[in-house]
Amino acid sequence: MSTPPPGVDRDVPLSRFTTIGTGGPARFLAEPADEDALIAMLRWAAEAGQPITVIGLGSNLLPADAGYDGLVLRLDGALASIDVTATGATLGGGASLAAAVRRVGDAGLSGFEFACAIPGTMGGAVRMNAGAYGAEIADVLVSVRICSSAGMRMATRDELGLSYRHSNLQAGEIVTAAELALTAGDPTAIRERVREYQGRRTAAQPRKARTFGSVFKNPGGELTSGQILEACGLKGYAVGGARISEKHANFIENFDGATSADVVALMAEARRRAKAQFGVELQHEVQTLGDIEIPPV
């Protein structure tokens, strides 16, 4: 294997970079600060036969206990920048959504308040067309910059094929910047709306526990995944150091040194009960990394 480019470290524990706090080591990990460095790393990975993944802030992510045999990337520097304009903003793929919500709101730009409930980065939000409170990234997105081992390309919102928690971005393609179109609004009213959303989230979801966010997608119909799992009596159900939240049944908490295997066991039991009691096959929203398999129902 050729020598990795500068900035690539070896055998870095992923538990340090995930909100759930589980996962073994990444064979390689890097935090590129610009597109040139990122593309160089992607080209090296392609030549060396190394799979790649981007982990953002580590939310919505469950790495295997055995780790990940490839290159893990966290976008930094210019790739995590937040630039506000008169009519919107350009956010780096690694930009924190929470920080971006504050910046655009202080500038009197509205339409992005919903993102205060999404604990992640802009690139990950585009990839899964993240949303909350009746809005989603597709509602405000104009275009993106995408890097891969082939170089950089631009894509419009329509070209991304955005739908519920889905885009057509391929493996190896990384969103490095996203342009948003927002509307003028009163900063005080915007801040109040954000506080309202945050208050609703605090009341409904575990905030102090270590989680990766929602476990399962809502299946459609009258009941949400959380309501289905609560009706199945799963609140507080634990395996090892992981348990289903007492506050919201669609969240799994690492309360006592949990492993990813503990989390997977909880997910499997939740899917089994939902299928047995409601005839619903829940599909997980959390992204897995490495050698993890959610057992079939």
Image: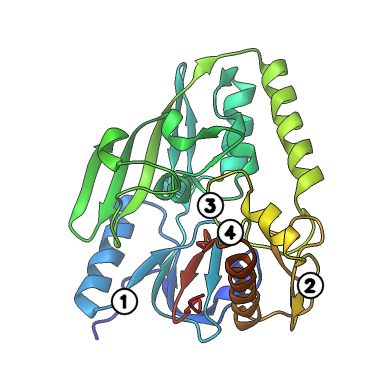
Q: Which mark is nearer the camera, 3 or 1?
A: 3
- Sequence-wise first label, 2 or 3: 3
The CA span between labels 3 and 4 is 21 Å
* Rendered location of residue 75, percent (x, y): 45, 55
Neighbourhood count class around disc 2 (C-alpha, 10 Å): few under 14, some 14–19, many 20 upward: some
Q: Which mark is residue 59?
A: 4
Residue that numbered label 1 is attached to: 4
Q: Which mark is residue 255?
A: 2
| Image quarter of residue 23 | bottom right
Mark 3 and mark 4 in contact? Answer it, CB < 8 Å. Answer: no
Q: Is residue 29 left or right of residue 1?
A: right
**Which residue is at the front of the view, 277 or 114?**
277
Q: Which mark is residue 97?
A: none
Which amino acid type corresponds to the residue marked 3 in the rendered image?
A: Pro
Neighbourhood count class around disc 3 (C-alpha, 10 Å): few under 14, some 14–19, many 20 upward: some
Q: Is residue 11 visible?
A: no
> Which residue does the image show at 54% across and 24% down from the upper left?
111
Residue that numbered label 3 is attached to: 219
